[in-house]
Image: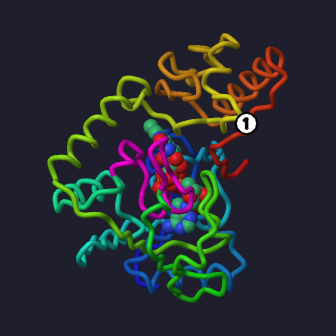
Amino acid sequence: MRGAVREQVPLGPFMHLRIGGPADWLLEPYAEEDAAAAVRACRDFDLPLRVLGGGSNVVVADAGVRGAVLHLGNLNRIVRDGNRITAGAGVTLPSLLRATKEVGLAGLEKLTGIPAMVGGAVAMNAGTRDGETFEHLLSLTVVDEDGRIAVWGKDRFRPIYRDGGLGRAVVLQATFELVPDDPKAIFERFSASLKKRNASQPVSQRSVGCVFRNPAGAAAGQLIEVAGCKTLRIGGIEVSGLHANYFVNEGQGSAADFVALMVEVKKRVHDRFGIELEPEVKFWGF
Ligand SMILES: Cc1cc2nc3c(=O)[nH]c(=O)nc-3n(C[C@H](O)[C@H](O)[C@H](O)COP(=O)(O)OP(=O)(O)OC[C@H]3O[C@@H](n4cnc5c(N)ncnc54)[C@H](O)[C@@H]3O)c2cc1C
């Protein structure tokens, strides 16, 4: 594999929450075929493998994770072909949105404000009330279960709510089919959703977005707020005063604090409403 292979690398700096101990191995391949080689090598050496995107939906344990973490930040090309845009898994959504806006291609502005990489947005089928990642997705290039590079068309897609249904496949790049529109109109929609988000979510603070899934017919944030948990704090992690389904790291928070706060909030919501909240966030190394 061409690329960087490093041992005992702290994951905190890669995570949106800025929390997390070391990975035994951090693999940063240069190109698609190197990523596939890394996946095959982990399989051959029986090393557990996790794929890290922008780290905006993962809490890593304070003791870190055993095995390898694959980071695809070098797969960062954006290529346009007519109304189609192909982006590497390591492209950040904000830079992809900027690019599509500039060339007058509409659709992805529904994802405004999600701090993901393209690979993570596909894996999670990230979305907002206005739409989801898979809506404009035409094809995916992946490393499949057998360690081979494959192109998946729509017939292979199995997305559900906040889950791209990829199984163990690793996304290398995604091609979106977009709709031509006036860049000014796209920019206005983009700005309007950003404004709405800035007013209702603690976007400038360290978090993992929504901690719990919305239970059927209810908003987790509202349940947490009514259960009196806003600004509840354990160690360095606090339930946001702006949006109660966001837990923010006030600086010195740990993964242990985060989990303890989740347990407490879950208990209070259960005591008040009899509803079991389920996590939306993923946990590594627990
Ligand atoms: C401030 C804030 C706001 C947010 N708002 C929203 C929102 O409005 N809507 C929403 O849906 N989410 C939101 N999120 C959550 C998060 O941004 C999404 O879940 C996003 O899709 C995660 O992408 P990521 O690149 O950061 O992935 P990571 O957090 O790094 O990983 C998430 C999952 O994707 C997998 N993964 C990552 N890259 C790949 C790849 N290349 N191939 C295969 N699997 C991969 C990981 O293994 C992991 O299981 C928000 C988060 C924050 C911090």
* Disc 1 residue type (three-letter): Ala
Is ligand 1 within 8 Å of the beta carbon of the residue shown at mark 1?
no
Q: Note whether 269 is above or below 169 in the view shown.
A: above
Residue extending furthest top? 228
Q: Please, which colouring scheme is shown? A: rainbow
Q: Residue at x 68, y 29 (%)?
A: 218
Q: Residue at x 60, y 82 (%)?
A: 144
Badge 1 density bin: few <14, some 14–19, many ≥20, Cα 10 Å: few
Label tally: 1
Q: Residue at x 35, y 55 (%)?
A: 108
Residue 23 can be seen in this image: no
Q: Residue at x 59, y 33 (%)?
A: 254
Who is closer to the viewer here, 219 or 251?
A: 219
Percent across and percent down for residue 248 are 51, 28
Residue 126 can be seen in this image: yes
Q: Is residue 203 left or right of residue 125?
A: left
Q: Which residue is mark 1?
A: 216
Percent across and percent down for residue 177 are 36, 70
Who is closer to the viewer here, 29 or 89?
A: 89
Q: Is residue 112 magenta?
A: yes
Q: Is residue 19 magenta?
A: no
Q: Which residues are magenta?
A: 109-132
Percent across and percent down for residue 276 are 81, 31
Who is closer to the viewer here, 222 or 257?
A: 222
Question: Mark 1: which secondary structure?
Answer: loop
Query: In the rendered image, which quarter is residue 44 located in?
Result: bottom right
